[in-house]
Image: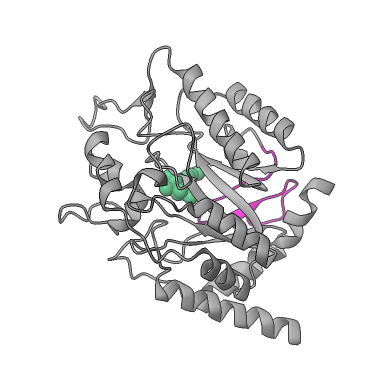
Amino acid sequence: FSQRMAWFNDAKYGMFIHFGLYSQLGGIYKGNDEGRYAEWIQGNQDIPTEEYAKLMDTWNPKNFDANKIVKLAKKAGMKYLVVTTKHHEGFCLWNSEYTDFDIAKTPMKGRDFIKELADACKKEGIHFGTYYSIIDWHHPSQHVTIDTETSKRNWGQPKMKEGKKQEYVQYMKNQIKELIENYDTEILWFDGDWTDWWTLEDGNDLYQYIRELKPEIIINNRVSKRKIFKKDFGTPEQFHPDSTLKHYWEACYTMNDSWGFKIKDKDWKRAEEVYEKLKDIHGKGGNFLLNVGPDGDGKIPKESAKILKEVGEMLKNDRKN
Ligand code: JFZ
């Protein structure tokens, strides 16, 4: 048992938010709807980085309402929230000093969605966490190469350019420092650790760096090679273990089949199914992180909001009985 992990262990149920430039596409680019995960559209449809970056000009989610989202999470019975500050596409949802590929250079300039969410969480008493992708399709340090077997570019394994790693690791550290100092994030939720050039040592080093900046922060195992590195909690995805584990863990799930908003994905789970998952996970000692993907306008799909409210009602009834 760890004092540092206590609030997280008690919180049990959280909201995951996948939001980025891709959200405006809803899984369709120039009429092509290939690919399962809408947030992977750049990779799934092999969109060159410079062309993809043009999405900044049309990204205008003016109805993104952090207070409304956080209130919805609260109503659903959730106690924490984790938002994609930078997904694999590399676009930053906050105003970062270290890149121009961020919200400040879009029609949304003047707004900062990470700040808005952090503030709304403070106000509502919801713990605030930030997702950060290690792989970055936009950063000049990385590039995708052609896989000899498939003759396709391998977006799942971006390569680090010769001599560029140190610069990129420094970029990550600078940005993470911003997320800690300016947004007071309580969880750093990494992803993309599977890439070849990211080593166990790199993960350990980054973990130490972050704990020194903010000792009480909680960091997921995807900061490093997740199969070996268990700190601070494990992150099974779209499945959960059959029995209790010795380390803290959190299962993340989507409500349909994508994380980012996807127009054609109507494969919504029923509220009962989500509720059963939650009960099962909690019975085995895990946390449950349930995803929403706001649309291009910034709004949470009505189907998602409905499921969240229904599950919230079921939880409320549990407490009454
Ligand atoms: C990653 C991302 O690529 C995806 O877009 C989403 O953000 C999700 C939460 O995380 O996807 C993964 C990560 C890990 C596995 C599979 C997909 N895995 O361990 O099998």
The number of callouts visible is 0
Locate residue 94, reporting x and y percent. 48, 46
Residue situated in front as seen by the camera: 37 or 260: 260
Residue 255 sits above or below residue 172 on the image: below
Residue at the image point whose x is 53% and y is 30% from the top: 172
Residue at the image point whose x is 61% and y is 83% from the top: 313
Residue situated in front as seen by the camera: 17 or 283: 17
Residue stretch in magenta: 230-252
Residue 200 sits above or below residue 304 on the image: above
Residue found farthest to the top = 163
**Drawn side of residue 20 relative to residue 33, left or right:** right
Residue at the image point whose x is 71% and y is 43% from the top: 217
Q: Is residue 231 visible?
A: yes
Residue 23 sits above or below residue 172 on the image: below
**Drawn side of residue 252 relative to residue 99, left or right:** right
Q: Quadrant of the C terminus?
A: bottom right
Dividing the picture into quarters, in which one does residue 161 lie? top left
Locate residue 192, reporting x and y percent. 48, 37
Locate residue 53, reporting x and y percent. 28, 40
Residue at the image point whose x is 62% and y is 68% from the top: 278
Residue situated in front as seen by the camera: 224 or 17: 17
**Drawn side of residue 214 relative to residue 312, left or right:** right
Dividing the picture into quarters, in which one does residue 9 lie? bottom right
